[in-house]
Amino acid sequence: MFSRRSRFLGVACVLSDSIPTGLAFLLAYWVRVWIGHTGSLSPIYPLRVYLPLLLASLFVFPILGYLLGAYQGVEMRRPRDIANDVVKMTSLGFLILLTGLFLFKGDYVSRSLLLVFAVFHFLLLGVGRAIFIYGISPRNRQERYRHFVIVGTGVAAAELASLLEEGERFGLRLLGFVSTATGESSPPAGLRGSYPVVPLEKLSELLHNHIVDEVVLTAAKMEELSKLEPLMQQCEREGVRMRMHLNFLSTVFSHVYVEHFAHVPLLTFTSTAPDEGGMLLKRIMDFSLAAVALVVLSPVFIFLAALVGLTSPGPIFYRQTRCGLGGRKFSLLKFRSMVDNAEDSLPHLEDLNEADGPAFKMRDDPRCTNVGRWMRAFSLDELPQLWNVLRGDMSLVGPRPPLPSEVEQYESWQRRRLRMRPGLTCLWALEGRSQLRFDRWVKLDLLYIDRWSIWLDCKILLKTIPAVLSGKGAH
């Protein structure tokens, strides 16, 4: 239920799953060697030859589990969910391994070894996940619950109490409330259970006479924090964990967390998810796929470059200053799709702009060459931006990089789209590309930022391919 514990259990589960994977591989190799000695099948190469396959397996299965969401909310997953995770990870993982062996010409790998490995992996991963879930479960009735006391009886306290009641099956239990108001107070309405409300001065008695694991403080206003300071000091002296519901910040910032700068604790507010590990994985995926795409598509680059150079005078590539992460400026690279010096004639076309907002879009832009119009329909002019992705200026998936002149016209809420590294494609590419109104375009970018995950990036990339090949909505 708590995000920090959930992330910790997710990382622990990744490490736990690596043990069955490695053990399954070694058992499969031993069984295959034994079968080879019996004469039923030919002998196989020594184990050191198969070490790259073992290392690839230890890399592929955790990444696949992360993409499938198998490590999110581990403590809340039911047996059916765990079984689905094991089936998906094993089947898709071995499909990826077989594809890799085909691409890298791994003909030396025994297919019977892979088959035995798949069987052992399925069995041991399921057993290992069951042992892991059992290991994080309470051993006895005394350990089964974490007991909470909520300080406050307002709206925020009611919300927290309701969540604790829902979390009872995960070991969370509400003991009661502490009132900060003078006079008698009643518990919040709408709760399933009946809970006592004690005055603030009796908190010590509550802590000493009952098992209290955590105290959750609620504050409707910043000024109330000073009133709760003696209570916080008491909890600190007695070693009781405290949490604070920052109710007055709930509608302002999406993420609030404490981070240390050297020894100084800083309460950090941000509207983008602080997922450094996920962002690192995103960058690795961007670099790897962009490098492979540049090599594989090199004949297409040569063909398009020749086509641009032979059909219209001017440079083959077009460079334009765009705004990247946080507004940082970089030089975006494209195949030239317009006549040379097309920007000089832009002021004469402003009245023909078909897009709302600061962006300029025109269906039959007279500056486009015949080849450029065709390239734009299938987004082929954007292919050189793979170099921008390789350099780190851009990502494969993210909000499109705007012009500095467009950013100057942004409203305050629209500037948040600059808080994610710009990309070649995003959610708007699946809904209409150039046909979208600007506000809708920005809202889709913000929706992507709020819901970002590696799995979402993969889905957008896969869905972009047919959207681009259809040529709809691009001009």
Image: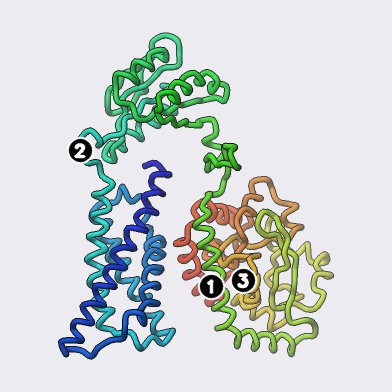
Camera sees residue 70: no
Q: From the image, which quarter does the N terminus lie in?
A: top left
Q: Which residue is mark 2?
A: 140
Which residue shows up at 28% across the image and 28% down it? 192
Q: Which residue is mark 3?
A: 390
Q: What amino acid type should be assigned to the residue bearing mark 3?
A: Leu
Camera sees residue 325: yes
Which residue shows up at 37% across the image and 23% down it? 188
Q: Which mark is residue 288?
A: 1
Q: What amino acid type should be assigned to the residue bearing mark 1?
A: Ser
236 vs 366, left or right, is left
Q: CA distance from mark 3 to mark 1?
A: 8 Å
Sooner in the amino-acid sequence: mark 3 or mark 1: 1
Q: Which mark is residue 78?
A: none
Q: What amino acid type should be assigned to the residue bearing mark 2?
A: Asn
Image location of residue 363, percent across then percent down: 67, 70
